[in-house]
Amino acid sequence: MTKTYVLDTSAFIYGIVPDGELVTPSRVYEEVKDEKSRLKLELISGLIVRDPCQECIAEIEDAALKTGDKHRISLTDRDLLALALEEKGSGKDVKIMTDDYAIQNIARKIGIDIVPLHQKKIKQKIEWEKRCIGCNRIYSEGEICDVCGSPLRLKKRSISRGKKNEKR
Ligand SMILES: [Zn+2]
């Protein structure tokens, strides 16, 4: 089955366009249109701009209330989710392309898969550090912890300081 991707604004900004049917709500289209990514938008052939039905919007608002994300999603986010729900309802294999945490949270709730956009960026940014398996102290070199004497293990440095989900 052809995959359907519902694209978030950031998908256009990063220029990440998967193979498959591409759908986006008009709010995303309007946001992207004014940005530099407009060019990319014009390069995407077969992009379908469509707005979700009222029933789907209501269902998303309900789901957002349940997950506690109601105040963390914008109208654009809501339309994006509702559109994905509607596509899924018509029997399509649909995924949402987004990095937005609140969108991901609600998508999980309504059973829609997410394709994150940030993975590539993170892959480029992996850094290593040595960490004590006893007390978790971090060292740049050595084999044994100076403090507790436990061995050090090489670990990926965790990068948790991503983009905050700030809403317009
Ligand atoms: Zn230690």
Image: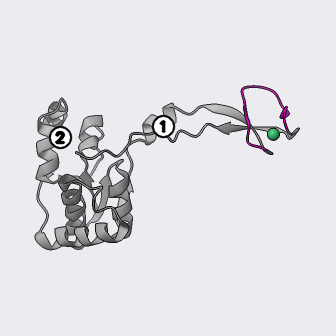
**The N terminus, quarter of image:** bottom left
Q: Is residue 157 left or right of residue 42?
A: right
| Magenta part, dominant SS | loop
Q: Is 32 on the left-hand or right-hand side of 11?
A: left
Whether residue 147 sits left or right of residue 128 in the image: it is: right
Q: Nearer the viewer, mark 1 or mark 2?
A: 1
Q: Position of residue 115 (x, y in %)?
A: 37, 52
Colour scheme of this structure image? one colour
Q: Who's the residue at 23% across and 68% down the image?
A: 61
Residue 90 left/right relative to 99: left
Instruction: Name the spot of residue 98 as percent of width and height, x first.
Output: 32, 49
The structure residue drawn at horizontal position 28% and vertical position 42%, both measured from the top left corner, is 11
Residue stretch rendered in magenta on the structure: 135-147
Q: Is mark 2 within 8 Å of ligand 1?
A: no
The x, y position of residue 34, in whole percent, is: 12, 34
Residue in the picture at 13% in, 50% down: 27
Find residue 103 and report its image quarter: bottom left
Give the CA separation, mark 1 to mark 2. 25 Å
- The three-letter amino acid code for the residue at tag 2 is Ile
Kindly identify the residue that appears in the image at 84 percent across and 31 percent down.
143
Q: Which mark is residue 44?
A: 2
Q: Please state which amino acid type lies under the numbered disc 1.
A: Ile
Quadrant of the rendering where the C terminus is positioned: top left
Q: Nearer the viewer, residue 15 or 140?
A: 140
Q: Is residue 141 magenta?
A: yes
Q: Determine which residue is flagged by label 1.
A: 122
What crowding class fits label 2: few (fewer than 14 Cα within 10 Å), some (14-19), or many (20 or more)?
A: few
Q: Secondary structure at mark 2?
A: loop
- Asked whether residue 47 is in view, the answer is no
